[in-house]
Image (tube, rainbow, N blue to C red):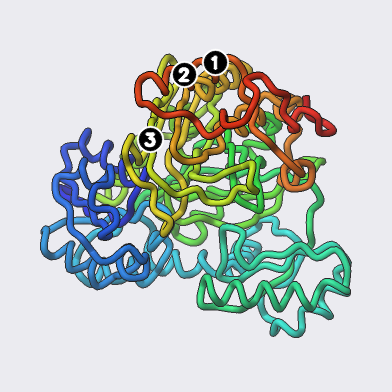
Amino acid sequence: MRIRKILIANRGEIAVRILRTCREMGIETVAIYSEIDRKAAHVLMADEAVCVGPADASSSYLNMEAIFDAASQTGVDAIHPGYGFLAENPEFARRCQEENRIFIGPSPEIIALLGDKTEARKRLNQHGLPVIPGTFGDEENAGLVKKAREMGFPVMVKAAAGGGGKGMRVVTSEEELEAAISSAAGEALAAFGNAQLYLEKQILSPRHIEVQILADHHGNVIHLLERECSAQRRHQKIVEECPSPVVTSELRERMGQAAVSAAKAVGYTNAGTFEFLVDDELNFYFLEVNTRIQVEHPVTEMVTGVDLVRQQILIAQKEPLAISQDQIFPKGHAIECRIYAEDPAQNFMPSPGVIASLVEPTGPGIRVDSGVYQGWSVPMEYDPILSKVIAYGENRDAAIQRMEGALKEMVLTGISSPVPFLKDLITSERFLEAMVTTDTLDHEIKAWNPTFPEEEALLAFVAHDLFGTTPKATTGKEVAQPSPWTQLGGFR
């Protein structure tokens, strides 16, 4: 069947991103919003919008009853969950089936299987996917102490139902273990309603590399290259790129085929991402599957020319993939920087408030996926991501140069953001030489203060003249001061 009307069960930049593809496909859209999001960008852009509750996410964006009431009220054919909130909730996908609405994603059974990290490790290892040595969730949490002793330190304590770094602890010695298990279990219970943990042997200074797949209902599965996601703080990705600067064509083939074979083995459909850790000898180990669109999907789109949201919708309509594996190869290089309402000079503390001025970069090879606008009040209640800046070039050097220019061009005042931090990161020696691993930022960046070179000062004065505002970074700072970032070992 052709989908004619989609409810987008999300907010912010991903809701806007989905809306844009729906417009191109001639599909009507319904936005949902909380009371605090009444004037949000995704609400203003949609054909229709329905309030689903107060600001608290549990009463609005996680409120299944209110969302399905909105779906009934507006007569939608399908629901797109975006990422986060209910995107990987098997019960939500099951309710869509029960109410004869298409869920744009995998089946509830697959979401349930792959959402259980320990069961996914066990099942996919049986299908030949290499997994990190560890446990499979068969032990009570108290029994993990003995297992850790047998495995040797360091180990990772991880939440079985987890993600996003919650319920995760690095343990370097037996003395730390019991406290780490206790705190990880408490955090996992609060975040996921499930305190079960498992262990993984920690791979020292790995890279985080993921493989994007598409799978239709006719048995066709392809991969769309890999993304490098190693630039992280506290297990949260900050910068992503496609293709990975260290993945060889031979490794790309092996990782891609491993993901495709595993997806076929479990009967996966729609878009999905197989995440791997890669060690310094280019051995790769399965980490998890994300059964949804990824925050970093634009870099894949820029390099392959494939609109992943469009493909999600076409697959949900039961159409066969019109793309074959031999049509997918890297054409250029793309880098994404995530723009959060956070203050990097204050340990990335959230920075809600009113966006006093906003000038987003433009130009050849630049894409901005944004969910905010000047005058919008960024709420405290949700994930602080505001937008994503994506730069494309004919090669990695060209993409980095464009990204540097884009970040210099961006003006965002009234709240703090990591824009200056990101500019320093992508021009650091470690990043330029593709030497960033998952622990680089946490271990080596002990302090950071914003640089404010002449180009950014000029933009600040322009912003002041246009909007009557002054960026926070200028307050009490010299215009061309050196950054502590550039004084750290290994960074220029």
Q: In the image, residue 362 lies at what x, y percent? A: 40, 19
Amino acid type, callout 1? Glu
When the figure is inspected, residue 369 is found, relative to residue 67, above or below; the finding is above
Query: Which residue bears the numbered disc 3?
Result: 356
Q: Residue at x 36, y 35 (%)?
A: 307
Q: Is residue 286 above or below residue 485?
A: below
Tell me which label, 3 or 2, sits earlier in the chain.
3
How many angstroms separate mark 3 from mark 2 (CA)? 14 Å
Corner quadrant of residue 465: top left
Looking at the rendered structure, the secondary structure element under dot 3 is loop
Question: Where in the figure is residue 20, as x and y percent of width and height?
Answer: 27, 36
On the image, the x and y values in percent for residue 7 come to 22, 54
Residue at screen point 40% across, 61% down: 85
Lower position in the chain sequence, tag 3 or tag 1: 3
Residue under label 2: 461
**Which secondary structure lies at badge 1?**
loop
* Residue 48 in sight in this render: yes
Question: Which residue is drawn at the image coordinates 77% and 78% (left, top)?
Answer: 144
Q: Looking at the image, tell me whether mark 2 or mark 1 is earlier in sequence order.
A: 1
Q: Is residue 255 visible from the viewing direction of this image? A: no
Give the numbered dot on residue 394.
1
- Which amino acid is tagged 3? Ala
Q: Position of residue 463 (x, y in %)?
A: 41, 22
Amino acid at the residue labelled 2: Phe
Indicate which disc residue 439 carries.
none
369 and 314: which one is in front?
A: 369
For the residue pair 380 and 301, the one nearer the viewer reads as: 380
Left or right of residue 165: residue 32: left
